[in-house]
Structure formats: C-alpha cells, structure tokens
Image (tube, rainbow, N blue to C red):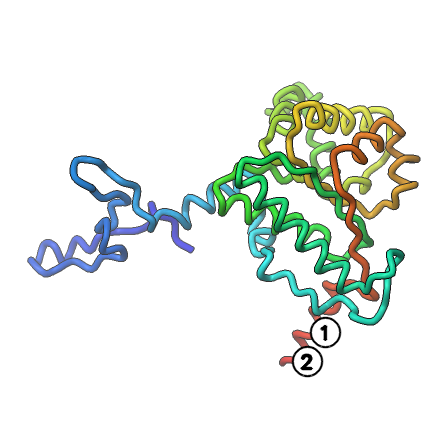
Amino acid sequence: MKKFADLKIDKEAINMGAEPHYRCQRCKDKGFYFEGDIAMACSCQRPAVLDLKREKAGITPHLAKQTFAAFDVSFYSAEKRGGNKLTYRDNAVATVKAAKGFTASVAAGENPDGLLFQGAVGYGKTFLAAACANDLIEKGVAVRFVVVPDFLDLIRDSFNDQSPYRESVLMQEVKTAPVLILDDLGAHNYTDWSVKTIFAILNYRLNYELPTVITTNLEREQLEELLGSRVYSRLLEMCRFFRLENANDIRWEKRIREKRKN
C-alpha cells in the first residue's frame, strides 16, 4: 500500500494543458480540501494514517492482518468439549464476543474489565489480541501491543550505557498506554526482577483502571505459582478469563486447508 507522501500529481499532463489524472478527485492528491474557508483532511489519507498508528502501537504487518473478520471459528471443533462443558467452537465464539464487546466499550469511552486469553500455542490467543488492537486503532483508540519476553529483553538492554533506551521511559509508555496488550505472558524466565517488572505494570494499570488484554499459555495455578500471589491477585481483579481450546495447532490446520485448495 502506498503512503500519501508517495502520491504524485500528473505534472506532465498539466504542462500539456490536459486534465491531470488524480488518484483522489476530492482533494486532487493534496491531502486536504476546503469547506468554505476551512481546510479539511481528506479521507484518502486514512490508510496511510492507520499504517502509522499501527506501527506506533507495535503492530507488525503480520499482526495487522489479524482482525475479527478474519478470525475463523470453523477451525475449532464443534464436537469436542472443554473443561466448562462447552464445545471448543462455542468457547471460541464466546471469547470473540467478549473481545468485540471489550473494544466497543473502550471506544465508547467506558472502562470495561480487561481480558485474559489462555490456551496452548497455536490456539488463536495472539490472533484475537491483535484483532482487538486493530479494531481499536480503526476506532481511533491508541493502543500499545507488547510481546512480554521482547519487552523484558529491551528493558534489560536499557541498563547498558550504550543503549538508546531508558528503563523509566519504556516502563512509563507501557504503564500509561490507553489500552495495553501484553502478549505471551509466561514465555520468559521467572526471576525476581521480571516478576517485579510485570507487577509494576499491572499494579499501575489496576490502580488507574486502564484497560488491558493479556495472552498466556499458563494455567491459573501456574500463573500464581510462577508470578506470585500478588501478580495473580491483580490479574483476577482486572481481567475476565477466557480459554481457547482446540485439538490441533490452528496454524498447522490452516496450512493443510491451503494445500487442499491448491
């Protein structure tokens, strides 16, 4: 997708006296138009603006493709049942419904409980968390998407005098983000330092009632054992827990479907 800055007016056509070809007839590729004496931003800039917002939020090109519309519940078994007696598919449908309700409430200026998605690798947790982020960005809400192990590594690197980052700045950006998504909580080494860092983030967001979405492959008992009762207690208070279950890794299932199509 080309950014607005890449758009060019057909200068050759202008020089020849011909009608130039504009990609946007409304603003004539200037990016703005006038309503009376007031300059208005043109909607043709929206794709480029959204790209910039996603980049700032930490949404990679791959994550940008993960939307509610693309979340296919048909990958989840309609026969096999989870611990709550619902089928895997019914659980997935309920989780998507909760995610959509969360983003709608945040966009409406409300302060909903956060969400915590549990499940094994390849069951759609990160996909759904990214879908939340993309939906909120489309709705004009600022989001920060953080992969927990990567963030902890970045914090550690900031202790190096040669690092361009500072721990206080990195922590403040994450703690105060209007909406924070913590992906892969649990996929790192549990040291006193890492637990204290996670606690500081969660405790701040709980105290200031800032919406948070979390993904983890840990069971509840593991969360409490590895992160400690203080972290676990705050997760219970600030988030609603949802479990995604399936018979197979959905990434693998998608590969199989694609091969069958070809």
Category of crowding for the residue at label 1, using alpha-carbon neighbours closer than 10 angstroms: few (below 14), some (14–19), many (at least 20): few
Image location (x, y in percent) of residue 97: 66, 54
To which residue does mark 2 refer? 260
194 or 46: which is nearer to us?
A: 46
- Residue 256 badge: 1
Residue 111, relative to residue 161: is it above or below? below
- Residue at disc 2, secondary structure: helix
> Which residue lies at the image location 60% right of the left edge and 37% below the top edge?
144
- Name above or below for residue 177 compared with residue 99: above
With 128 as the anchor, is 193 left or right in this view? right
Residue sitting nearer the eye, 78 or 1: 78
Q: Is residue 86 left or right of residue 135?
A: right
- At label 1, the amino acid type is Ile
Image point 73% across, 59% down: which residue? 92
The residue lying at 78 percent from left, 56 percent from top is 244
Q: Which quadrant of the figure has residue 109?
A: top right
Considering every residue shown, the one lying at the far left of the view is: 17
Q: Are marks 2 and 1 in contact (CB under 8 Å)?
A: yes
The quadrant of the picture occupied by the C terminus is bottom right
Across and down, in percent, residue 98 comes to 68, 50
**What kind of residue is marked 2?**
Arg
- Give the label on residue 65, or none: none
Question: How many C-alpha atoms fall within 10 Å of the one at disc 2: few (<14), some, or many (≥20)?
Answer: few
Q: Secondary structure at mark 1?
A: helix
Where residue 151 appears, x then y in whole percent? 70, 34
Q: Residue at x 55, y 49 (%)?
A: 135
